Image: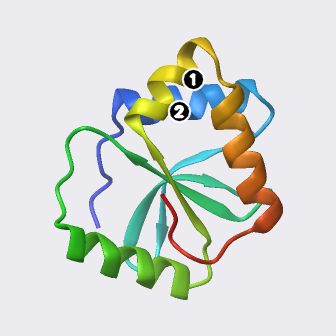
Amino acid sequence: MPRPRVSSGQRLLRNILVDNGFGPIQMEYGVAGYSVDLYLPEHHIGIEYDGPLHHLTHQEDAVRCANITKAGLPLLHVTSAEVKVAKSNPKALVKKVAAFVRLRGTQCKG
């Protein structure tokens, strides 16, 4: 599988999380034949950045998410709007990720 291009939004999300104690973070982590935008190995969770451009249909994305979580990787979705706010005030985003880490949810959440 060719390595997907990392977007500026994904890089910004990664930097915000690392700056707030969630490092190390792997970009474009392969699992179940898919690439997950960010992987936090210390917590064994994946984070998907939902940017303004999305290349999958809702149904395709649901299947992809189900296959990733079935493979054992809890997955959290973070929107471009959340990342935009977090540039100047990361508190809400950090709280969202910290809560997910504590729960280690197994369902695809947005």
Q: Examine the image and state in which quarter residue 69 appears.
A: bottom right
* Residue type of the residue flagged with mark 2: Leu
Whether residue 83 can be seen here: yes
Q: Is residue 51 left or right of residue 29?
A: left
Q: Is residue 52 left or right of residue 28?
A: left
Q: Examine the image and state in which quarter residue 47 appears.
A: bottom right
Q: Give the residue pinned by disc 1.
A: 86
Q: CA distance from mark 1 to mark 2?
A: 8 Å
Mark sitting earlier along the chain (1/2): 2
Dot 1 falls on a residue whose secondary structure is: helix
Task: Point out which mark residue 3 bears.
Answer: none
* Residue type of the residue flagged with mark 1: Ala
User: Does 34 appear above or below 32?
Assistant: above
Q: Give the residue pinned by disc 2.
A: 13
Q: Residue at x 49, y 33 (%)?
A: 82
* Residues under numbered marks 1 and 2 in contact, where contact means CB atoms less than 8 Å apart: yes
Question: At which x and y percent is residue 28?
Answer: 45, 53
| Numbered disc in front, either 1 or 2 | 1
Q: Residue at x 27, y 59 (%)?
A: 2
Question: At which x and y percent is residue 53?
Answer: 20, 42
Dot 2 falls on a residue whose secondary structure is: helix
Mark 1 nearby-residue class (10 Å; few <14, some 14–19, many ≥20): some
